[in-house]
Amino acid sequence: MKKITIQTKKIGLFFLVMLSGLAYSQTIEGSIDKNPVYSIEGTGYEESESKRQFIFSNLNIEGDNKNEITLNNNEITVKKDGIYRISLSSEINKGVEKEQQLQYSIHLNNKEAFQSEKGAISQEGIYYFQIQLKSGDTLSFDVPSDKMLDATSKNNLSVRFTDPNLITFSDDDYH
């Protein structure tokens, strides 16, 4: 009878540890989800030189507005240092074969910072990235192409601030 009691206590302790670990991980993940999501929409693009800058005209906020970004003249300006998770999409790319997909160009403070790589855009035309920004930095988005584009394509941008205190780094090598 004594062996059964000890075994039962070990199993009970094991489940207690597992459940508390699960509750802890949900608490951390839940704090990330409390950050507002800034959803920005627009239609078409504005041509200048050889680029076509996406037009964004409507800013919606899901969650509490913490005034982390503003929208002005198709550019977003961040008001807080940190890492931002961004998804960019346009109907311009929807349904286009991967070989023919147009690339997105991301501009930081009016200079091209980088372009999406071929194949990095999902079949739905969505490009995901994260970037570290400083307060006052501006981002704009365009399609560098000489192809004729549909000026009635809907554009979507989703921006979420990521609290750097919730990000962990590891020096472990995984081979």
Image (cartoon, rainbow, N blue to C red):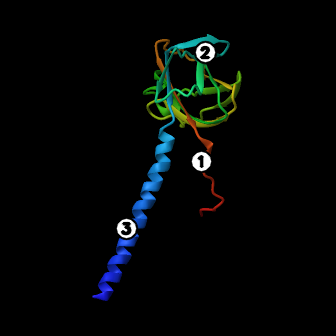
- Counting from the top left corner in percent of width and height, residue 114 is at 66, 31
- Residue type at mark 3? Phe
Q: Secondary structure at mark 1?
A: loop
- Residue type at mark 1? Ile
- Counting from the top left corner in percent of width and height, residue 43 is at 49, 14
Residue beneath the point at 37% across and 67% down: 15
Q: Quadrant of the N terminus?
A: bottom left
Front-most of 56 and 91? 56
Q: Is the residue 74 above or below the residue 97 in the image?
A: above
**For residue 59, side relative to residue 136 (left or right):** left
The numbered disc on residue 85 is none
Crowding at label 2, few (<14), some or many (≥20) Cα neighbours within 10 Å?
A: few
As measured in the structure, the alpha-carbon distance from the residue carrying label 2 to the one carrying label 1 is 30 Å
Residue beneath the point at 65% across and 31% down: 80
Front-most of 16 and 153? 16
Residue beneath the point at 35% across and 74% down: 11
Crowding at label 1, few (<14), some or many (≥20) Cα neighbours within 10 Å?
A: few
Mark 1 and mark 3 lie on one chain; the one further toward the N terminus is: 3
Q: Secondary structure at mark 2?
A: strand
Q: Secondary structure at mark 3?
A: helix
Mark 3 and mark 2 lie on one chain; the one further toward the N terminus is: 3
Q: Quadrant of the C terminus?
A: bottom right
- Residue type at mark 2? Asn
The numbered disc on residue 167 is 1
As measured in the structure, the alpha-carbon distance from the residue carrying label 1 to the one carrying label 3 is 27 Å
Mark 2 and mark 1 lie on one chain; the one further toward the N terminus is: 2
Look at mark 3 in the image and give the residue it sits on. 15
